[in-house]
Amino acid sequence: MDSRTGQSSCARALAELPGATRVLRFLKPPAERAFGAFTDTLLSVDPYAPTACAGWSVHDLTAHLAAGSAEIADLVELELAEGRTRPTRGFDEREAPYRALSPKKLRRSFFAEALRATVAVERLAAADDGQRRVMFTGVALDAPTLILHIESELVLHRWDIAGSDDVSIAALSDPRLAEHAVTTVAAMQPNVFASGGLVTNVGDCHPAERTLLLWGRRPD
């Protein structure tokens, strides 16, 4: 069994245990606060409820995040083990197997892949005094930028589910998320914004609204 298979098997075994959420929080996953907020919301809603991400249910968003964590873990592991990369797989290719799972199995996979991503990002941060980068969606990202991207995804998709409650407003108001959107995310290929491109005419609005508009969401 190679190291990647071993890490994946260990992560899945941990995710099968009762209290997997507590295990992940103990291990301090990337973007710990955003992860905890998203998880609390995920476990309190109907998996097939609609979301503000047009055409996507809570189940679809969970598959998106699980597949994203798996892709990050795979790419980091490949970079660290072999010093090479491969093209980042598109959304449909990497998410389809997760969408096909039952809600219970998908949530377990979400936790398992979050565990794998946690280990992978920690290893990337420790490599070459923190200077090692991994190609993700056409952009070379170091560990802190990967963590910020994970945080952005969790915050954005929690808003897709829960809307503009106090937790969402506080998280979306962080200027780091808007800066990440207009720099790193805008450079990703293929384009990942829901609107098909970066919305630049955001005007004089609340910081949380600005972040949502940059990602192509409609705050109202």
Image (spheres, helix red, strand yellow):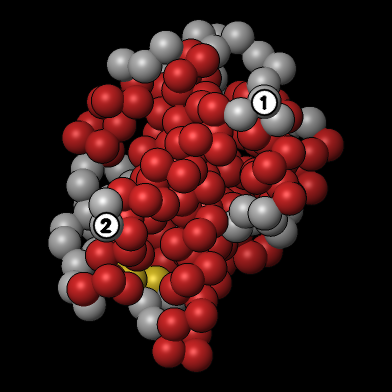
What residue appears at the point 45 percent right and 23 percent down from the top-left corner? 106
Instruction: Name the residue nearer the viewer: 189 or 117.
Output: 117
Residue 94 in the image: above or below residue 133: above
Distance of label 1 from label 2 (alpha carbons): 27 Å
Residue 63 in the image: above or below residue 101: below
Q: Amino acid at mark 2?
A: Asp
Disc 2 secondary structure class? loop
Instruction: Name the residue nearer the viewer: 59 or 180.
Output: 59
Q: Which mark is residue 203?
A: none
Residue 56 position by quadrant: top left
In the displayed structure image, the side of residue 21 where residue 148 appears, left or right = left
Instruction: Name the residue nearer the viewer: 76 or 93.
Output: 76
| Residue that protrudes farthest toward the front in the picture | 1
Q: Amino acid at mark 1?
A: Pro
Question: Considering the image in quadrants, where does the C terminus appear?
Answer: top right
Between disc 1 and disc 2, whose residue precedes? Answer: 2
Residue 71 point in image, percent of width and height = 33, 49
Badge 2: residue crowd in 10 Å (few <14, some 14–19, many ≥20): few
Residue 46 position by quadrant: top right
Does residue 70 appear in the picture of this structure? yes
In the displayed structure image, the side of residue 80 where residue 87 appears, left or right = left
Instruction: Report which residue position mark 2 lands on.
Output: 2
| Residue that protrudes farthest toward the right in the picture | 166
Instruction: Report which residue position mark 1 lands on.
Output: 18
What residue appears at the point 26 percent right and 26 percent down from the top-left corner? 96
Does residue 188 appear in the picture of this structure? no
Instruction: Name the residue nearer the viewer: 47 or 106.
Output: 106
